[in-house]
Image: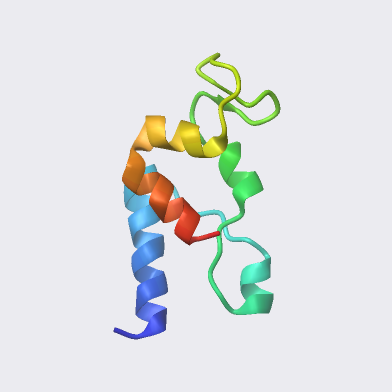
């Protein structure tokens, strides 16, 4: 499997899990390595408030914790791999 196919696979898997396209980090074009924009992602997670670090009103929630609770462990692992 070629590297480009692998990137496509990850982007397709992201959309399948989250229901929207992965926000692309501008560094993707400079580094020539696909990466997601974590700042844009945190505003797209339902029930997560990135300014207050809360999830469903629960305090002290990281984005990773919110992703795990909303979408599952596999989603959190995928996001980490795309940073």
Of residues 73 and 36, the one drawn nearer to the viewer in this rendering: 73
Find residue 6 and report its horizontal and vertical position in percent.
Answer: 36, 74
Q: Quadrant of the C terminus?
A: bottom right
> At x 39% / y 54%, what residue is drawn?
14
Q: Look at the picture and state if 45 lies above or below 4.
A: above
- Residue 34 seen from this side: yes
> At x 50% / y 39%, what residue is drawn?
64
Of residues 80 and 31, the one drawn nearer to the viewer in this rendering: 80
What is the residue that sits farthest to the left in this orientation? 1
Find residue 75 and report its horizontal and vertical position in percent.
Answer: 38, 46
- The count of marks equals 0
Left or right of 67 on screen, residue 24: right
Q: Look at the picture and state if 4 lies above or below 76.
A: below
> At x 38% / y 64%, what residue is drawn?
10
Find residue 45 and report its horizontal and vertical position in percent.
Answer: 51, 35
Q: Quadrant of the N terminus?
A: bottom left
What is the residue that sits farthest to the front in this orientation? 60
Left or right of 33 on screen, residue 13: left
Q: Quadrant of residue 63?
A: top right
Q: Look at the picture and state if 10 lies above or below 4.
A: above
- Residue 21 seen from this side: no
> At x 33% / y 57%, what residue is drawn?
13
What is the residue that sits farthest to the bottom in this orientation? 2
């Amino acid at each position: 499997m070629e590297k480009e196919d692998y990137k496509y696979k990850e982007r397709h898997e992201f959309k399948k899990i989250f229901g929207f396209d992965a926000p692309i980090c501008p560094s993707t074009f400079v580094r020539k390595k696909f990466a997601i924009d974590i700042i844009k992602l945190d505003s797209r997670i339902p029930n997560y408030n990135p300014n207050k670090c809360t999830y469903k009103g629960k305090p002290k929630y990281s984005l990773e914790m919110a992703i795990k609770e909303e979408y599952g462990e596999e989603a959190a692992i995928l996001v980490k791999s795309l940073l």
